[in-house]
């Protein structure tokens, strides 16, 4: 009797799915500027794509696309890339220069910023504007910490005003509220009821910030995004669709501004 092993056709092992690969490539724009383009090989990508956001230019390639094809695509869209980078440069926020009058974003507005020498680093509100107090030898790190501490204090004050009107209809209160710098999310609720909110929410218009708070509080009732969950959101915040559209339009800019200001 012939061995069953000889009768069984050889089946090659299924290849493991490849992970996303990233590298940076130099590129010269039409105006002579040299930039770095993030090149990403993405297993889920179906076509070559070029995009620009607050972090710079990104060239996305499917796994089967050749590097030559990617370079050709990049050169073919050089004009578009130059224009898009110019648009982002015009709207990008710059970190405040010590001693120079400027502005800082807060609750959808740009507030005037003044400087003052003091014993320790602190950012405060005065007469409709902001005042940055810094010791003579304080560096950029102290300035960033002062901005972050100020934003967190302002954000906690907003939450303290909004939270009481929603607590009575919840099964429990959040165990803790934390503010973090989030890359993509605006908020999250942990299984232990700890609520995390993106610190950049305090730069957005207040109604958008409040919507995110309501959204995460409703996860204390429903842990999913089912129709029942959205009914809970709608009952408490009927204008949630407008705020979602606001984040689609302004979210990247808001998050980028926080990264520039606090690192």
Image: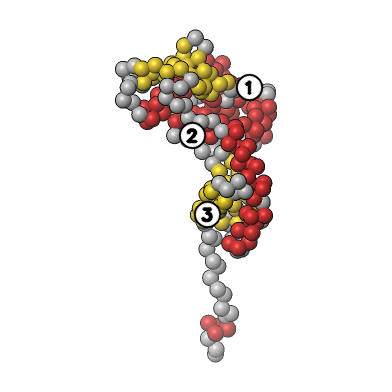
Closer to the camera in the image, 159 or 47: 47
Q: Is residue 244 above or below residue 66?
A: above
Of the residues under marks 2 and 3, which one precedes in the sequence? 3
Q: Which residue is mark 2?
A: 259
* Image coords of residue 65 (percent x, y): 62, 62
Q: Which residue is mark 3?
A: 25
Element marked by disc 1: helix
* Image coords of residue 172 (percent x, y): 50, 24
Closer to the camera in the image, 67 or 231: 67
Q: Is residue 163 visible?
A: no
Q: Which residue is mark 1?
A: 236
Res. 72 mark: none
* Image coords of residue 69 (percent x, y): 63, 61
- Most distant residue in the top direction: 127
Q: Is residue 219 above or below residue 59?
A: above
Q: CA distance from mark 2 to mark 3?
A: 23 Å
Q: Residue at x 46, y 14 (%)?
A: 125
* Image coords of residue 184 (percent x, y): 54, 38
Are discs 2 and 3 less than 8 Å apart at CB? no
Q: Residue at x 49, y 9 (%)?
A: 127
Element marked by disc 2: helix
Closer to the camera in the image, 97 or 133: 97
Q: Give the side of residue 227 with respect to residue 161, left or right.
A: right
């Amino acid at each position: 009797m012939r061995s069953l092993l000889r009768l069984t056709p050889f089946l090659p092992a299924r290849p493991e799915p490849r992970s996303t690969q990233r590298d940076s490539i130099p590129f010269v724009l039409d105006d002579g500027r040299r930039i770095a383009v993030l090149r990403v090989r993405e297993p889920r990508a179906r076509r070559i794509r070029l995009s620009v956001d607050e972090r710079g230019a990104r060239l996305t390639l499917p796994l089967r696309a050749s590097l030559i094809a990617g370079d050709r695509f990049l050169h073919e869209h050089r004009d578009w890339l130059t224009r898009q980078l110019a648009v982002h440069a015009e709207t990008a926020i710059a970190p405040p220069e010590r001693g120079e009058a400027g502005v800082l974003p807060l609750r959808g507005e740009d507030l005037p910023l003044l400087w003052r020498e003091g014993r320790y680093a602190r950012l405060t509100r005065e007469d409709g504007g902001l005042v940055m107090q810094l010791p003579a030898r304080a560096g950029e790190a102290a300035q960033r910490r002062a901005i972050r501490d100020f934003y967190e204090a302002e954000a906690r004050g907003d939450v303290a005003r909004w939270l009481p009107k929603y607590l009575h209809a919840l099964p429990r209160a959040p165990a803790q509220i934390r503010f973090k710098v989030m890359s993509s999310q605006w908020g999250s609720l942990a299984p232990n009821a700890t609520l995390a909110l993106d610190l950049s929410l305090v730069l957005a218009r207040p109604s958008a910030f409040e919507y995110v708070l309501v959204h995460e509080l409703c996860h204390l009732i429903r842990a999913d995004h089912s129709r029942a969950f959205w009914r809970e959101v709608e009952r408490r915040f009927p204008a949630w669709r407008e705020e979602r559209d606001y984040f689609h339009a302004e979210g990247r800019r808001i998050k980028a501004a926080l990264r520039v200001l606090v690192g």
